[in-house]
Amino acid sequence: MKNYTITVNGNVYDVTVEENGNAAASAAAPKAAPKAAPKAAPKAAPKAAGAGSIEVKAGAAGKVFKVEASVGQSVKKGDAVVIIEAMKMEIPVVAPEDGTVASIDVAVGDAIDAGQVLATLN
């Protein structure tokens, strides 16, 4: 084990690091709860029966923060359809052209990859 003193935003933390990569923090720094394993995504999710031909794709990996549009809603080019959160920023994913929302393929809280289809338009 190795001991380090780390300063973050003016706060000093004493940290003990194990050689195998597991970290244990001293009483000076709160210990983070372990994260749950992510759910396995289906290999190839079939498109909904009413899916449109225009795909609205994520520009970055992140997490779905908010779904702005609903199925059947008319959208103009540039209108936000889904908002994703990546690196503590909210990033709108916009309609690539005018159309009607045919399907929303994600839900709030879903982890997404860059290039993943989030919705379709007609």
Image (spheres, rainbow, N blue to C red):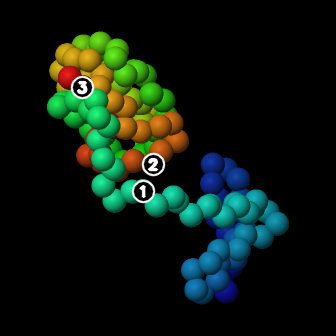
Q: Report the mark closest to the observer, 3 or 2.
A: 3
- The image shows residue 2 at horizontal and vertical percentages of 65, 83
Q: Name the residue under label 1.
A: 41
Q: Earlier in the sequence, mark 3 or mark 1?
A: 1
Q: Nearer the viewer, residue 32 or 96?
A: 96
As shown in the figure, which amino acid type bears the numbered disc 1? Ala
Q: In the visual, does 107 lie left or right of 75?
A: right
| Residue 10 visible in the picture | yes
Q: Do the residues labelled 1 and 2 touch (CB within 8 Å)?
A: yes
Q: Mark 2 points at which residue?
A: 111
Q: Nearer the viewer, residue 98 or 93?
A: 98
- Which residue is depicted at the point 37% across and 38% down? 105
- Which residue is depicted at the point 67% across and 86% down? 1
Q: In which quarter of the image is residue 15?
A: bottom right
Q: Report the mark closest to the observer, 1 or 2.
A: 1
The alpha-carbon separation of the residues under discs 3 and 2 comes to: 21 Å
Q: Which of marks 3 and 2 is nearer the N terminus?
A: 2
Q: Nearer the viewer, residue 72 or 1?
A: 72
Q: Name the residue under label 3.
A: 121
As shown in the figure, which amino acid type bears the numbered disc 2? Ala
Q: In which quarter of the image is residue 95?
A: top left
Number of other residues with Cα within 10 Å of mark 1, as a class: few under 14, some 14 to 19, many 20 or more: few
As shown in the figure, which amino acid type bears the numbered disc 3? Leu
Q: Give the residue at the far front of this rendering.
A: 49
The alpha-carbon separation of the residues under discs 1 and 2 comes to: 9 Å
Tell me the number on the disc at residue 32: none
**On screen, residue 17 above or below 34:** below
